[in-house]
Image (cartoon, rainbow, N blue to C red):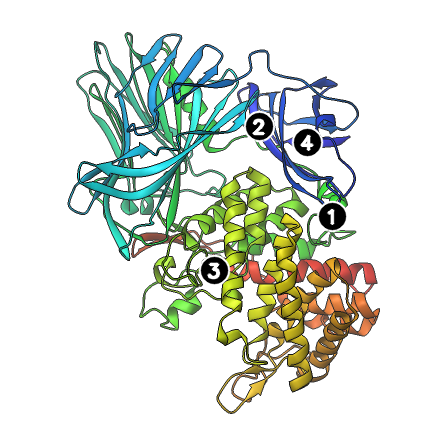
Amino acid sequence: MTELFFEKLSRFPRLSQPCTISIPFRQGQLTDVGMLSIEDEGKKLPTQKSILSTWPDGSVKWVLVNFLVDLPGNNEKKITMSLNEPANASPEIPVLVCMQAGRPCITTGDIQYVFSSPGEKSIFYSIDGPGFHFSKNEYNGPTIYDENGNAFTLTIDETGWSILENGPVRVVLFAKGRHLNSDGSLLNFEIRIEAYASKPYLMLDYRIINKDKSAQTILKGIKMTYRPKGRTDNVHTSLATSNYRSNIIKGQSTDIIEQAIDSTYLLNDANEQFPETLYGTFWADWSCPDKGGVCATIFQAYQNFPKALKVSQAGMDISILPDDNSLTFYQGMAKTHRVFLHFHDFNETVENLNVQSLQFQMPDRPILSASVYKDAGVFEDVFPTEKISKVETSLISMADQRLKAYGILHWGDAPDPGYTEQGREGGKLVWTNNEYDYPHAMMLMYARTGERRMLDYHLVSARHQLDVDICHFSDDPLRYQGQISHSAHHTNGEITPSHEWVEGLLDYYHQTGDIAALEGAIGIGENILRILKTPKFQTTGGLSARETGWALRTIVALYKETHDKKWLKPADSIVDDFEDWKNEYGGWLAPYTDHTIIRVPFMISIAVNSLMRYYRIKPQERIKSMILSAVYDMVENCIMENRLFYYKELPSLRRLGNNPLVLEALCYAYELSGDIELLKAGLPTFDNAIEFNLAFNHAKKAVEDAVIVYGGASPKRFAQYFLPIAYYYKTAQEAGIL
């Protein structure tokens, strides 16, 4: 049996609370997902299971489990997962979905939601439940306003709705289309709706995608509105902001309550929490005796500023982009916002609404022990036999102490001060675009520590990468589907294999079941394959080792995920290129100036680390030989008198190298050779890498359209340092030299 641990969270009990967890299994362990059960003191809980990934033999690798559980107030809880016998537990009242004349209809206990049919504007057709009723055309939007103030309203396309999940714990609907008005259209969209058994609320994910022909589109507003019809006497309204404690403003029929979250608000709002896990909540409520009530919560509104809410007798405005703001939305860019809609009768208290809204912002997440991930073998082995306090403190500090950025296009990323101060973008902020696969590093950190915020770091950064850092539309096939490298506005950079990563996106898919993440990762792989066919990549030794090294790492990850053999041929071709390169130059030397070709240890290490990943799935003696040759060459020629590796092999660049990627390469060479001296060569680099300042800094500054929180280096540092340090830490400890 496997333990699922809920840490202490809300002081209020949560009954039949919907929770989600993704569980990994070692190859051959689980072949029938029907045998999996979640149990609370021996009682099987209502569950819904989705296989997300399999091993080559067809057995389950990752399964996403949605379940309902009773959680105590102000206390932790442990439940279990077992594989003993068929498990068919369902909710007493399951959530149901059916199609009625092209309209999906969801029933969650006493509540029935009917959604718009193809060609209709807005999302909802009607909502009915005990004490509330909302009809057609009362909910409008989302509507987008262009730079001239023209309104374009969400319209479901002719394909209509898809049922992605069909109960009994939750139903998931999906639709897409364009925003239309009488003169034309603007921006694509995708809508994802989640509803839960016996729960009076919906989760709505609204994603806009710029597939228009112009290089950029100026937006002046994005808004959802509720305008009640019929009798609306004795209207009660309320609006809440929160940080430590909620500030709830209550109003009556004649009152107008509104609040905007902008950069000025954030600069004057103190907050000591890790905002990926919780900053606060932001909600508004409208209710009257004849109509009932609806409470709208914008998820992570502060982090994704600007945002605004307005509520009055006339109804409610949910402003994803307030109409006094301007947003430059670049071609190929996407952005997802999440809104929770909680429907209730007139007697619901604002205190209960506030508690539920905070629950939306910081949901309960069950935690698996590190041994589950280690035993399943789904990640790199970053699980030490015994934890060393100094190393663990360094890794946690490095994860927590970094720059962060608030902003509608920036949340989940941060600028890199080094790139910015070099003047790479003429003084504009240079965004890292999750360089070195920061989301994957954070997923590994979560797996080995069980610290909830590490998972939240992963989820936020991977969502940003999936939306903003990938080019979702372009007429240029070498740009389409690719991940854009560090640049101003996240979009100015080139697309090249040395700055494209997919492992974090695959992790996000495994943790959430969001198929868009899998599609995004495959799209990056397709982009890389197109780039590898260009003349630039046909010259032996004409590129740095990191270009085809990172390409190979992506290709291997996608083959392991999909088992599609189309990825093997380009992988073999890259191995051929590395072999030709080594034979011609005696090693993987990179061109620098027009008259030099040099060793670059961190780039060579990228090649080694990627080749080792391929070697694990397709062992070849030539790969082993190249890895050992490259690492022995680095140890012989790239270490300075102080025993640290240099940066690059030129008198003008022979400074101390601070890139620990060499540590991972040394580990792989040790595994292949058994030569302990290779590991020992990395000790000075390891000692240097784990030195870290423990001081926190919460200074904030508005720069361009972002609010920057200065807490340390850019996210690139953790992404670059974590895996090599953690892998060396584990390997050197087992070898007895640490």
Question: Do the residues bearing badges 4 and 3 touch, measured as CB atoms within 8 Å?
Answer: no
Label 4 or label 2, whichever comes before in sequence order: 4
Foreground label between 2 and 3: 2
Residue lying furthest left? 148
Residue identifier under label 1: 377
Q: Do labels 4 and 2 touch, CB within 8 Å?
A: no
| Mark 1 / mark 4, whichever is N-terminal | 4
Judging from the image, what secondary structure is the residue with disc 4 in? strand
Amino acid found under the numbered disc labelled 1:
Gly
The reply to whether discs 1 and 4 touch (Cβ–Cβ < 8 Å) is no
Q: Which label is found at residue 4?
A: 4
Check residue 19 in the rendering and tell me which mark sits there, or answer none.
2
* Mark nearer the N terminus (4 vs 3): 4
- SS of the residue under disc 3: loop
Q: Residues within 10 Å of mark 4 (few under 14, many from 20)?
A: many
In the figure, is residue 53 to the left or right of 25?
left
What crowding class fits label 2: few (fewer than 14 Cα within 10 Å), some (14-19), or many (20 or more)? some
Q: Residue at x 39, y 22 (%)?
A: 102
Residue at x 36% of width, y 63% of height: 492
Looking at the picture, which amino acid does disc 3 mark?
Ser
Q: Is residue 264 left or right of residue 148?
A: right
Quadrant housing residue 370: top right
Q: Amino acid at mark 2?
A: Cys
Question: Quarter-wise, where is residue 421 in the image?
Answer: bottom left
Tell me which numbered mark, 2 or 3, is placed earlier along the sequence: 2
Residue where numbered disc 3 is placed: 714
